[in-house]
């Protein structure tokens, strides 16, 4: 299954690469006008995430939600857990009730296709990989980021060879089809909010293809959604 997924993702990336160019990191206020609202609510979102973290073993590992990502989620003995509120337009009803503030923000912004809390175990390394297609952008908001002994954020997000260390309340909008990896260099769980944002301003053919792919993935998520 992983080979099929990787092959399909590679083909889709090739199509988009021929039609869309851009930088790995994008201006959030241009591509995600609601960024200030989400950034301003980071403490509320952190409070909700910390309540979930109190029973972290009940939160699934990423590869348990998406088996195609086994190689990057289960590459070592350390956990990468995902608490998903929404995935490609499909909400997880039993989860949204636990995060009313985040749910209200997500529900008011139709370009937010997915929303999840990401819990990265101490020492966890997510190896280099690429996202499937450029029809969505990834928004990262630090919620509870441990510090190293020298006072720097203890999690390193490396995108296209450039390191980014984002602390509590700091954010980044980026194109995850560029090669990237993450490492938690601390001895504490790192918590972040991840959003998938619909990419606007594409050529018409890419816009139509994106709508199709988003609906197809959404349908697959709906069929596999938790009961």
Image (cartoon, rainbow, N blue to C red):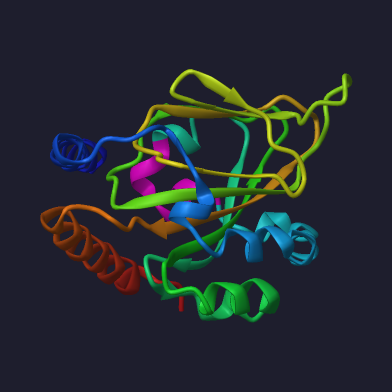
Identify the residue at horizontal 52%, vertical 78% (top origin): 107
Residue 183 magenta-highlighted: no
Q: Nearer the viewer, residue 186 or 54?
A: 186
Residue farthest toward the front in the current orientation of the protein: 30
Q: Position of residue 36 (x, y in %)?
A: 64, 60
Identify the residue at horizontal 39%, vertical 30% (top origin): 129
Quarter-wise, where is residue 123 in the image?
A: top right
- Seen in the picture, residue 5 relative to 65 is either above or below; the reply is above
Residue 65 magenta-highlighted: yes
Q: Position of residue 99 (x, y in %)?
A: 67, 74
Identify the residue at horizontal 45%, vertical 73% (top origin): 226
Horizontally, residue 120 falls left or right of residue 5, namely right
Q: Position of residue 92 (x, y in %)?
A: 49, 75
Quadrant placement of the N terminus: top left
- Seen in the picture, residue 48 relative to 65 is either above or below; the reply is below
- Seen in the picture, residue 57 relative to 184 is either above or below; the reply is below
Residue 98 can be seen, yes or no: no
Residue 90 can be seen, yes or no: yes
Q: Which residues are magenta?
A: 61-70
Quarter-wise, where is residue 186 in the image?
A: top right
The kind of secondary structure the magenta stretch mainly shows is helix
């Amino acid at each position: 299954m992983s080979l099929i997924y990787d092959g399909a993702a590679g083909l889709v990336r090739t199509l988009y690469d021929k039609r869309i160019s851009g930088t790995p990191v994008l201006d959030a206020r241009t591509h995600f006008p609601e960024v200030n609202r989400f950034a301003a609510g980071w403490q509320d979102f952190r409070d909700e995430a910390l309540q979930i973290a109190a029973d972290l073993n009940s939160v699934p590992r990423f590869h348990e939600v998406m088996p195609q990502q086994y190689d990057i989620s289960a590459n070592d003995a350390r956990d990468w857990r995902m608490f998903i509120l929404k995935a490609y337009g499909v909400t997880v009803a039993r989860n949204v009730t636990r995060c009313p503030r985040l749910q209200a923000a997500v529900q008011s912004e139709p370009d937010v296709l997915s929303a999840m809390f990401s819990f990265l175990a101490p020492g966890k390394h997510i190896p280099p990989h690429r996202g499937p297609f450029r029809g969505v952008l990834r928004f990262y908001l630090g919620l509870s980021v441990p510090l190293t002994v020298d006072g720097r954020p203890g999690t390193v997000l490396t995108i296209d060879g450039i390191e980014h260390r984002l602390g509590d309340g700091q954010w980044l909008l980026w194109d995850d089809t560029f090669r990237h990896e993450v490492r938690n260099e601390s001895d504490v769980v790192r918590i972040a909010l991840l959003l998938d944002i619909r990419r606007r301003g594409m050529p018409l053919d890419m816009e139509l293809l994106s709508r199709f792919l988003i609906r197809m993935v959404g349908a697959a998520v709906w069929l596999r959604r938790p009961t």
